[in-house]
Amino acid sequence: MIKFNVPAVAGKEKNYLKMVLRSKLFAGDNEFTKKCCSWLQTRLGCFKVLLTPSCTHALEMSAILSDIQPGDEVIMPSFTFVSTANAFLLRGAKIVFVDIRPDTQNIDEKLIEDAITERTKCIVVVHYAGVAAEMDAILSIAKRYSLVVVEDAAQAILSSYKGKPLGTFGQMGCLSFHETKNIHCGEGGAILLGDPELSERAEIIREKGTNRSCFFRGQVDKYSWVDIGSSYLLGELSAAFLYAQMEMAERIVQNRMCNWNHYYDGLAEMEQRGFLERPVIPDECIQNGHLFYIKAKSLAERTALIDYLAEKGIMTVFHYVPLHSSKAGQLYTCFHGEDRHTTDISERLLRLPLYYQLPRDRIEYIVEAVRQFYLNN
Ligand SMILES: *Cc1c(COP(=O)(O)O)cnc(C)c1O
């Protein structure tokens, strides 16, 4: 069986974990956390990075930092993971979905303005598959209406738009280090912040609403409860594991991109003959090989393809069930405008196995299996 995902192991994880065991410093904000944060700050050119237990937690922090009040509206795509919506729902926001673009599956920037009301506070963009949403247009709308922009960059580490790393465009950017992502520590995440004032509040929110970070810097002589908050620190063992991955991040991304390109080239003929669609990467985007998908013609065709590939020992995955049509989505959210692409694409998109060091001959085997499916049907 060819697995859909095999989490990367970079090599030095064990050494770094042993170092933490010897140091007996297991809580967050120790040496490896600092190494990870400065790696991200340097690599992405961003003012402040805080590691979190997951991207979900980084999104929750973003919702608190956006000062969401009950009834405030937040605009986002419905074609995303549940955490994007949940984080804001937990603050009492009304989630307003708009349709996605049929090429990148990212929020359609042309539909955002029409969904804005007096209560709109925030636009959340998701960089699907590590390919950027149309940030120039989105930032200009946000500026005109004084809206906060949050980037769900869970899939987008080391991707960029017009040369600038994803996660650094909005007031907040959220990364995931879940084992299904390019670099990981099992469960983990980070919030990226560009603004010093927001960063200061973020440090308080993650420390249970206390100014403990100021205390450690010697700025106050006793720490106390000053704001709402929760516990949003990543433990040091996870940070040590993560740092080993960061040191190899470029190589991991390079390898994933080779795999991605191998699929892309291998399936060119199938697209030219009109059997399927391959991903579209706009010129201004550099992506990170996070996932490779094809689009079938219909739900029935995709189902048949999944079964065919499973028979050949190939595991494939589809997503997302559009949030607005899921059970919780029907209770708590609304879709603004017409759903032209969200549901349609969610029924046709199929992800093929892609991971670090996926052998080339397996990709060739998978490409051949897809070819056979179409040529024999
Ligand atoms: C993976 C993912 C998340 C959640 O990440 P966790 O670290 O597991 O919380 C959120 N949004 C998107 C788009 C994702 O792909």
Image: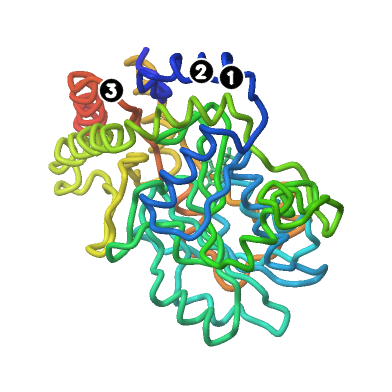
Number of numbered labels in the structure image: 3
Mark 1 closeness class: few <14, some 14–19, many ≥20 residues within 10 Å: few
Q: Which residue is mark 1?
A: 23
Q: Amino acid at mark 3?
A: Leu
Tell me the quadrant of ligand 1: top right
What residue is shown at x 52% (from left), y 41% (from top)?
176
The image shows residue 93 at horizontal and vertical percentages of 75, 64
Instruction: Categorize mark 2 by other alpha carbons within 10 Å: few (<14), some (14-19), many (20+).
Output: some
Which residue is drawn at the image coordinates 63% and 30% (left, top)?
Answer: 235
Marks 3,2: beta carbons within 8 A: no
Camera-near label (3 vs 1) is 1
Label 3: which residue? 358
Q: CA distance from mark 2 to mark 1?
A: 6 Å
Disc with the residue nearer the chain's start (3 vs 2) = 2
**Label ID, residue 19:** 2
C-alpha distance separating marks 3 and 2: 30 Å
> Could you tell whether 311 is left or right of 113 in the image?
left
Comparing 69 with 22, the one in front is 22
* Residue at 63 percent of width and 71 percent of height: 122
Of 18 and 143, the residue lying toward us: 18
Q: Are marks 2 and 1 in contact (CB under 8 Å)?
A: yes
Of labels 3 and 1, earlier in sequence is 1
Label 2 amino acid? Met
Local packing at callout 3 (Cα closer than 10 Å; few below 14, some 14-19, many 20+) is some
Identify the amino acid type marked 1.
Ser
Instruction: Tell me what residue is drawn at x 43 percent, y 23 percent.
Output: 7
Q: Secondary structure at mark 2?
A: helix
Rendering coords of residue 126 (x, y %): 49, 56
Q: Nearer the viewer, residue 312 or 51?
A: 51
Q: Quadrant of the N terminus?
A: top left
